[in-house]
Image: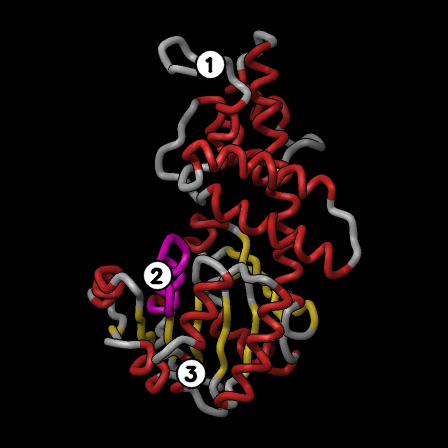
Amino acid sequence: MPHPTLGFIGLGLMGDPMTRRLLDAGFEVTVWNRTPAKAETLGSAGARVAGSIGELVQKVDVVMLCLANTEVVEAVVFGEGGVAEHGHHGQTLIDFSSSDPEATRDFAVRLEERCGMAWVDCPVSGGVAGAEAGSLVMMAGGEAARIDALRPLLAPLATRVTHMGPVGAGQVTKVCNQMVVGCQAAVLAEMVALAEASGVEAGRLTEALAGGFADSTPFRILTPRMAASDFADPPWHLRTLLKDLDMAVAQSRRSASATPMSGLAAQLLRAHATRGHAEHDPATLVEAYRPARKGSGA
């Protein structure tokens, strides 16, 4: 597959910069989005804008998805006018979304039976900054030879692509990633609030703990935002992290593997989401531990 033509569906926080990097790398990319305005914006950057999913699929060798959740992936692929209705043998679907592993395995079987397309699950980690810089890390599930053939087109997007096993293994690995991130987000909120309540300047925590055992990417991103109550332009949404923690708990039931910490983190995030924070930065979790402000009605 020396010069594959690409189709990209899902042009949100991650999909937009990923598509731009593919265009900058010289790939021919056709785009489609449920919100047409986002696709038109990429059209001015050199992408071809398809009027429908079917039109996109008929023009490309590889279909890429970066969608909100498992349900949206299923609708785009198997819904009326979706990918499965127009795909054919020889094409590959790459799902960058964070989707349920069991559902992903089912989707792969259904897609091959329906139209002959192959499925590669390739969820990503690194956030919007990683998508913009092309420094994402990818965890892939599927046939090894197929994933090796796809590496040149993934190179503009990622610093590392790790083949984790058959279809679904990439999604299991992303669940593992999100278990760590979700539990860290929960404890970082406690940590910042504790520092503040104890008279410590929380804004200096990042400097003080950098390079130590507590240091991590979530620590460096979330701690200063929590300390400064800087919740504008969130790098990702609380609802997304909650969705991934729920998938971790579901996977634990299937595999008979206990996940008490992830389950607790999910419940803490769920409680915060019900207070109106589902679309907000996970950094807002710190507000759950701060004393109620006068006049807030709390």
Q: Earlier in the sequence, mark 2 or mark 3?
A: 3
Q: Which circle, 1 or 2, is nearer the viewer?
A: 1
Quarter assignment of residue 83: bottom left
Considering depth in this image, is 244 or 141 the residue closer to the camera?
Answer: 244
Predominant SS along the magenta part: helix
**Which span is picked out in magenta?**
9-23
Q: How is the image coloured?
A: secondary structure
- What amino acid type should be assigned to the residue bearing mark 1? Ala
Q: Position of residue 92 (x, y in %)?
A: 49, 81
Say which quadrant the C terminus sits in: top left
Sort mark 1 into few (<14), some (14-19) or many (20+) by Cα contacts within 10 Å. Answer: few
Residue 17 belongs to the span the image colors magenta: yes
Quarter assignment of residue 213: top right
42 to the left or right of 283: left
Sort mark 3 into few (<14), some (14-19) or many (20+) by Cα contacts within 10 Å. Answer: some
Q: Position of residue 239 (x, y in %)?
A: 48, 45
- What amino acid type should be assigned to the residue bearing mark 3? Pro
Cα separation, mark 2 vs mark 3, equals: 20 Å
Residue denoted by label 1: 292
Considering depth in this image, is 58 or 214 the residue closer to the camera?
Answer: 58
Q: Which circle, 2 or 3, is nearer the viewer?
A: 2
Circle on res. 11: 2
In the orientation shown, which residue stands out farthest toward the bottom? 89
